[in-house]
Every structure is written in structure tokens, then in C-alpha cells.
Amino acid sequence: MLFNKKTEYSIKILLFLAERKDNAFINAGEIAASVKLPKEFLSKILQTLTHFGIVDSQKGKGGGFRLGISSDKIKLIELINAFEDEAFFKTCIIGMYKECRGCNCPMHDNWESLKEEMKNSLLIDTTSIKKEPVDAMLRYSKCEVIGMHPVFGPNVSSLKNQIVILCPARTKKWLNWIVNIFEKNKAKIKITTPEKHDEMMSIIQGLNHFSTLSVAHAMKELGISVEESLEYTSPIYKLRMAMIGRILNQEPRLYANIEIMNPKNKEVLRIYEESSIKLQKIIATKNTKEFLRYFNECAEFFGDFKEEAEKVSDYLIEQMVEKEK
């Protein structure tokens, strides 16, 4: 046979699930009995199919497995990428010869062309975390792999000056193609590793979203009306509230994943907690000298960016004031 046992059994499993018109969850025992496969071997195949979104799983009473997508949308190439190794690409397509190289079977030319297309295709993701998705794409595919993170939301009207982070993991031809597309639209490209990406996102997203939610929740606990507070403040506070409100107007599950799924967030939030407790103690003991030391350490760390930040925020404040006239 052309395919290895895992691919063969994955096809049998999917055919069995596709026959269930009600698309109800089916327990692993029933699936194993149908395809005549040991449960241990079956669980590994189902885990891979679930990882690729081809199969849905549900734990507990009434749980099991079912198709995650319509049967007519399942592609053989997805199963090949999931279960086959390099030996697959060296085998004669119809089994007439041990090796495809140099064979003259009726399908040889077409198979050679298809193999190159599969190997030279591109697998890409657009998640906010990169290490785990990129590792999975490398593990479960043979094609080129690039992790991509567009650092902007769906409401932007243009790609101009928007940042797109690329994490090339296995690529020859597709990286330049992607870079050219974004650069033609005047986007800014940052190329890095998945590890470095996740480290930076633990600050840019993990730390900042955590502090944003903490402020909002503290205001709720204090019973402070946002609208009333705006009557007492300067535009800079309103700008801060606008940034908090903007986050809270989004889909919460997205932010849950950003905070929970990045493994580097744990250490970052530990440091944040320590810094917050230190400042809290300084204020509680009314230690002005230590407060000034704390403040100046932060100011020194921010360096020349402080001046740029003041100019940018002044500009934003002027725009807000003009808009309200």
C-alpha cells in the first residue's frame, strides 16, 4: 500500500464518522471496534486528527469524537501531512516499484509534480502566540512553515505602518513572497524567532492587558462610575479610559487565550506583582525618598523614549480637545 498504517486507519476512522448522519459524539471503544484497531493506537490517531481540527472531541458522559468539519472539506493532503514521513515521498504512487526515483509507472510524472507541490506549499498561522503553533506545524507537515502575527485588529483601514511579525521556521521561497506583499502595502515587517516573539508578547500583550483589566476591575470593586470620573479629569485620563474601554469592547475569549496560553506570562506577572507590592509598601509607609528612587529608576529605564512619549501623547490630547469643541 502507498500509505502507512496511521494514514490508512485515519481514513477508515473518518469514513466511519462521516457515515453518522446525526454527527453525534461516538466513544473511542465503538470507533475501535468498527475499524478493528487497538484503543492505544486509536487514541494517538484521534489526538492528531483533533489537533488539526478534522475531528472534535468531548470529555465526560455523552462525549467522544465526531467530525470537526464537513466530510466534503477533508483533504487527503491534510492526512498526508499529519501522518506520513519522508519515506512517503520516495515511494512509487501505485506500488509497482520500491522507489519512485527512476520508476516508469503510468503515474510517475504526475506524482513527481504533485510531490513537489506538496513539499513547496506553505503552512502559516496568525495566532498571538508562536512557539507552540510553529512547533506543531513543523511536526505535522512536510511543507514550508512560517508563523505570522499581524499586530493589529480587523478594523484598520490600511496596512500602512502596521507591524507584521514573521517567524520563518522552514522556508525557501515563500518568505520573500510574503514580505513583498506586505511591503508593497507599506506595512512594517519584523522577522524574529517564535521564542523571541512570545517573550516580547508577554510584555506587549500579557503584562499590558493584565494591568488594564486590573484597573477596570479595581474601579468596579470601588464602585467608581467611569462617566462621573471623567467630569473631574484631564484629557490624558480620558485617553487612558479609552484604551481600557477599547479592550473591554472586544471578544473576551481572545484575551483569555492571550493571557493564559503564553507560558512566558507567568514569570512576567510574578515580576509585575513584586514591583506592585514594592510600590504599595513605599506608599503605605509614606517614604518619599524611596518613592523618588522608584520613580527615577523607571524614568532612567525609559531613557529618551520619555520625550517621544510626551510629544505623542500631547498630540493625541490636542486631537481629543479639538474633536470635543
Image (spheres, rainbow, N blue to C red):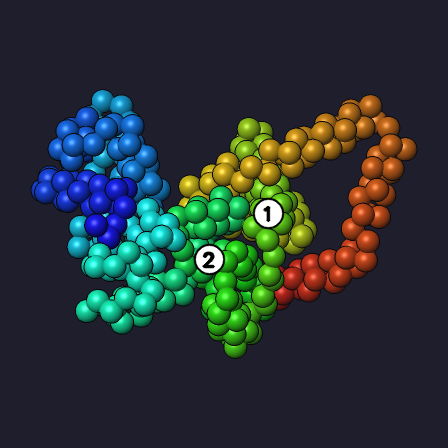
Amino acid type, callout 2: Val
Q: Identify the residue at image location x=44%, y=55%.
A: 125
Classify mark 1: helix, strand or loop.
helix
Q: Identify the residue at image location x=21%, y=50%.
A: 1
Q: Which residue is mark 2?
A: 145
| Residue 194 horizontal/vertical position (percent) | 56, 50
Q: Identify the residue at image location x=29%, y=38%.
A: 45
| Residue 231 horizontal/vertical position (percent) | 61, 46
Name which of mark 2 and mark 1 comes first in the sequence.
Answer: 2
The reply, left or right, for residue 124 in relation to residue 288 is left
Mark in front: 2 vs 1: 2
Q: Quadrant of residue 40?
A: top left
Q: Which residue is mark 1?
A: 195
How packed is label 1: few (under 14 Cα within 10 Å), some, or many (20 or more)? some
Classify mark 2: helix, strand or loop.
strand
| Residue 220 horizontal/vertical position (percent) | 53, 32
Residue located farthest toward the bottom when viewing the structure as drawn: 184
The reply, left or right, for residue 65 in relation to residue 235 is left
Q: On the rendered image, what quadrant is the C terminus found in?
A: bottom right
